Image (cartoon, coloured by chain):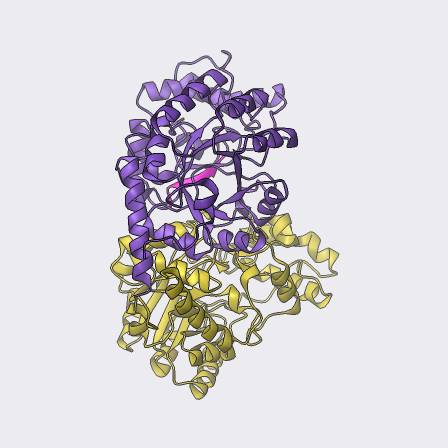
Chain colours: A yellow, B purple
Amino acid sequence: MSDWPDRRVLDLFGIDLPILLAPMAGPGTPELAIAVCEAGGLGALPGSQLDPPRLTRAIETIRAATKRPLNLNFFCHAAPARDEAQARAWRGALASYYLELGLDPDDPAPMAARRPFDTEACAVVEVHRPEVVSFHFGLPAPDLVARVKATGAKIIASATTVAEALWLEARGCDAIIAMGWEAGGHRGSFLNLDPDAQVGTFALVPQVVDAVRLPVVAAGGVADARGIVAALALGASAVQIGTAYLLCPEAKLSPMHRAALTAASDDATRLSNVFTGRPARGIVNRVMREQGPISATAPAFPLAAEAMGPLRARAEAHGSADFTPLWSGQAARLARALPAGELTRRLGEDVLAKLAGLAR
Amino acid sequence: MSDWPDRRVLDLFGIDLPILLAPMAGPGTPELAIAVCEAGGLGALPGSQLDPPRLTRAIETIRAATKRPLNLNFFCHAAPARDEAQARAWRGALASYYLELGLDPDDPAPMAARRPFDTEACAVVEVHRPEVVSFHFGLPAPDLVARVKATGAKIIASATTVAEALWLEARGCDAIIAMGWEAGGHRGSFLNLDPDAQVGTFALVPQVVDAVRLPVVAAGGVADARGIVAALALGASAVQIGTAYLLCPEAKLSPMHRAALTAASDDATRLSNVFTGRPARGIVNRVMREQGPISATAPAFPLAAEAMGPLRARAEAHGSADFTPLWSGQAARLARALPAGELTRRLGEDVLAKLAGLAR
């Protein structure tokens, strides 16, 4: 034997291995996507922090290097109304850090760079026709979903509860990413954002599998061949892996973030909204400890990031990660510092060997 | 094939199936333990809510019905100092409920019945010699651990982090229960009690497996054959199952608790300290919503239960579960209302079939 027990996601996307690279706005690069694509997984490009010209260049870089299917990822939050009172309260909460770092709390902060999927981004999709388009925080408006589907792209999105999975299935998704409590970065939640209510991967995956007809991609704590086999056993057709790719040389990661990941214990992370306004999992640092992990003062996503930006830049210049989001899932300890293509191929081989071994 | 890929826990305890019944103070009965023992799993009796005479009778009931190995479980918290100011504050927080239910907030409440493992309980162990003794919240004092070991019993205990697993291994445990975020009832935590820091089963199990030499039992979200196979894939040698046994006729469960479990969605539970003073997972109800899920006013375990007791009794008499701890893990949806012996045997058969099927 050397075939996969469940080919639904493989056939849906036209890939060889049931491994999806998590998009990871920030660390995700064209080079990381290319390496995973070429190894037979589904590479992903995070699109929400790129304006259309930069997004176009990134896609062209990938398309020039690989003919394999690509997943283009977007946030689809509702752009928040700007609440000046809340913005002032948030800057007030952070003011002492500004003074400590020699910054003026009244200086205007740069606009938060995270854009929701819009007609401009959709136009890029229509020109470059990625094989897969994935969304985080639900789905964009129905007319935009229809335009994406009309390009032939398969649409996938994250569910953190069974109710979210059913919502996505009813609105035309082709597969569901079941994103468990363990996952690093932003929760994909859109119906239940309560951090305390989030469901562990082990409980979430089989309940989503039972609830929907679509194939399910398990995410959250999946970091090695053991995790992939376990996800398949729970009924997933594939996995999405993020944190385990962060130590790859193709990922854009600061030395501080890399050092924090390498040292992270299993209980080193928390869900926190202090960096962007939405709950996201990262390694505990000073601002998360002192202002959160969940702050009632933080403005809506992505506005909380604005006042944090100058603090982060100044602190990082001094070698401090006190204000840096150190995104990580709960299994950073399992990450291996290998080139992404080699990591992907090894995972595939190890999974097939484990599947055979379990049934000796 | 029909043998188990990992026999370490099977051989350690002398059981046929890698399935441990979670003790479950409250719903756990001698009848439930007997049924799991006779089906080839490891039955368990929760000992902490029974005084020595009642504990002795319960053990004798089990021993008369089965010759199979038995796990006798105890809490081993430090008995808390009584803090009158905190007790008053807690009764104050609950006073309006007392008035609403026609109770006098100043009437003395019964003492909390949860006893830490002590010399009296140890004497029962020495007389009845259970094959396995399990502890929750760490381990008792070294002299008590030594007395238990001297009886020949294998000692197991719950770890919710890698650090807790290493602590338990260093103090003489024979196997580690890796208890993930999904698990129902009281967290076994003793070094890191922060609910936000708890690690999902999917991330916890492989990291504990990598850290300790002892065999690992996966707990938390394991509720059907898919979960057992997944736990084995993650490196566990066995699983501990609680919530999935709650619908068995042998479990002592109120109709209200049963109805809540049957209706529970994946995101219906929270970790809450309002019932006993320690974080425990149950289905959200009124007092958890209004006073928690985590209350800074709740006294230390188990003292918070005292003032809750009269509210629970009066509300339940009126058919309300507003003050009842509805313990449940995050996978209640996967529970099946079968006799416990039949459930255990079916799980074993289904797992072996799945193991064979994964490698077709």
As drawn, is A317 to the left or to the right of B71? Answer: right
Q: x%, y% of residue A80? A: 45, 59
Inspect the magenta stretch and tell me whether residue B268 lies in it.
yes
Location of residue A291 with respect to A345 vertically, above or below: above
Visible residue check, residue A79: no
Q: Residue at x 29, y 50 (%)?
A: B350
Image coords of residue B74 (percent x, y) = 51, 29
Residue at horizontal 49 percent and vertical 18 percent from the top: B51
Snapshot quadrant of residue B319? top left
Q: Would residue A331 appear left or right of B258 to someone viewing this image?
A: right
Q: Where's residue A281, x and y in %?
A: 52, 56
Which span is picked out in magenta? Answer: B267-272
Magenta stretch, overall SS: strand
| Residue furthest to the bottom | A64
Residue at the image position 50 percent from the left and 48 percent from the top:
B216
Of residue A331 and residue A329, the one placed in the foreground of this image is: A331
